[in-house]
Image: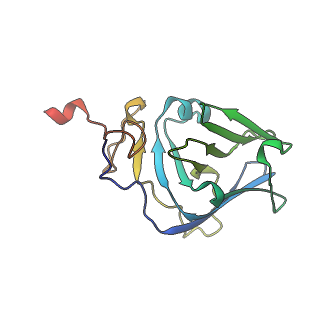
Amino acid sequence: MSTDTKPVDATPVHVRGACHCKRFQVEANGVTVFNCLCHCSVCRRISGAPVSHFIGFPIDAVNLLREGKVVDDVAAEAGVLAYSTSDHLVRYSCARCSSPLFSHSSMEAFPFRDVAVGILDRSDPAVLPPKPAVHIFYVDRIMDLPDALPKFVGFPGMSELYKDDDDDA
């Protein structure tokens, strides 16, 4: 497996966002565990976009809020939909407006919560969210993104770098 590429910068970040109807807010504070552009078929189908940008954090760094108060039991919260897209990943969204809130991975080797960058607030127009560091599941892409970011077959550290057939030429 290729582990020579770091998927993130170890600088602590604070991000805050909300669903479209503003019923729920998501807040994350801490050092990111990944910052990626995901090309997997699940993300594409759920978002309707060719690629999704996510920032991942340790589980305890991401909180769901309603009316400014932290929601302690997300799975039991009225108005939150939970959808399992694999044995280890649950995606939470707002039942009213369908916006994604965050995903929760219980994968033993790699537990995390990730936030979709598209829901983040831009209260200060001069401050942008952190830039993505890698592409993941690039083999599943439906469009090429010719940039200098490393492109992985799956998760960095758990898969190889994607090798395009044109790389042999």
- Residue 31, position in %: x, y? 52, 64
153 displayed left or right of 70: left
Q: Percent from the top left, x then y, of residue 20? A: 73, 48
Farthest residue in the left direction? 169
Residue 39: image location, x then y, percent: 46, 36
- View extreme (front): residue: 108
Q: Is residue 11 above or below residue 88?
A: below
The picture quadrant where one finds residue 99 is top right
- What colouring style does the render use? rainbow
Left of 119 or right of it: where is 34?
left
In depth, the one of 41 and 123 nearer the eye is 41
Determine whether 168 is above or below 32 in the image.
above
Q: Nearer the viewer, residue 92 or 127?
A: 92
Q: Is residue 52 left or right of residue 83?
A: left
Identify the residue shown where x is 55% and y is 43%.
Answer: 108
Q: How many labels sit on residues?
A: 0
Q: Quadrant of the N terminus?
A: top left
- Give the quadrant of the C terminus: top left
Quadrant hosting residue 154: top left
Q: Decide which of 110, 133 is in the foreground and name it.
A: 110
